Amino acid sequence: MRAIVPPLKWSKETFDGLVQNFKFPDSWGATYPEEGQTAAQAPAGYITLFWDYFSVGNFRLPVTRFFLEILEYYKFHISQLHPIRMVRIRHF
């Protein structure tokens, strides 16, 4: 049985605005998901980042070495981190 995919809450135009406003370099290859694609289906070499990371968690790229060390120490993948928890990490 195929899982029901919830609709995206944002548009391609919103995604393009995020890429432009946060000045993502072209070399990062940021891509908008294909219709029906889930967060778990990121292409090889890519990670899924949610809008809430940027809007609620005040997440910014590139990340600091400290942020990466926190993820490594606690053995978290960024996709396992709730945006509110990102705020707590940024307090340091």
Image: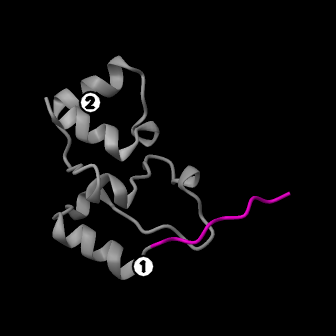
Q: Amino acid at mark 1?
A: Ser
- Horizontally, residue 75 falls left or right of residue 64, namely right
Q: Amino acid at mark 2?
A: Leu
- Horizontally, residue 40 falls left or right of residue 27, namely right
Q: Indicate how the structure is coloured in the image.
A: one colour
Magenta-colored segment: predominant secondary structure:
loop
88, above or below 69, in the image: below
Q: Earlier in the sequence, mark 1 or mark 2?
A: 1
Percent across and percent down for residue 40 are 57, 50
Q: Secondary structure at mark 1?
A: loop
Does residue 44 belong to the magenta stretch? no
Tell me which segment is drawn in magenta.
1-9
Q: Which residue is mark 2?
A: 68
Q: Nearer the viewer, residue 89 or 27?
A: 89
Task: Kindly identify which numbered label has been placed on residue 59.
Answer: none
- Horizontally, residue 52 falls left or right of residue 69, namely right
Q: Give the quarter of the figure containing the N terminus.
A: bottom right
Q: Residues within 10 Å of mark 2 (few under 14, many from 20)?
A: few
- Horizontally, residue 66 falls left or right of residue 84, namely left
Name the residue at 33% across, 61% down. 29
- Using the numbered discs, state the Cα–Cα distance from disc 1 to disc 2 in whole angstroms: 29 Å
Name the residue at 34% across, 72% down. 15
4, above or below 67, in the image: below
Q: Give the quarter of the figure containing the C terminus.
A: top left
Name the residue at 24% across, 34% down. 88
Residue lying at the far top of the rendered structure:
73
Q: Which residue is mark 1?
A: 11
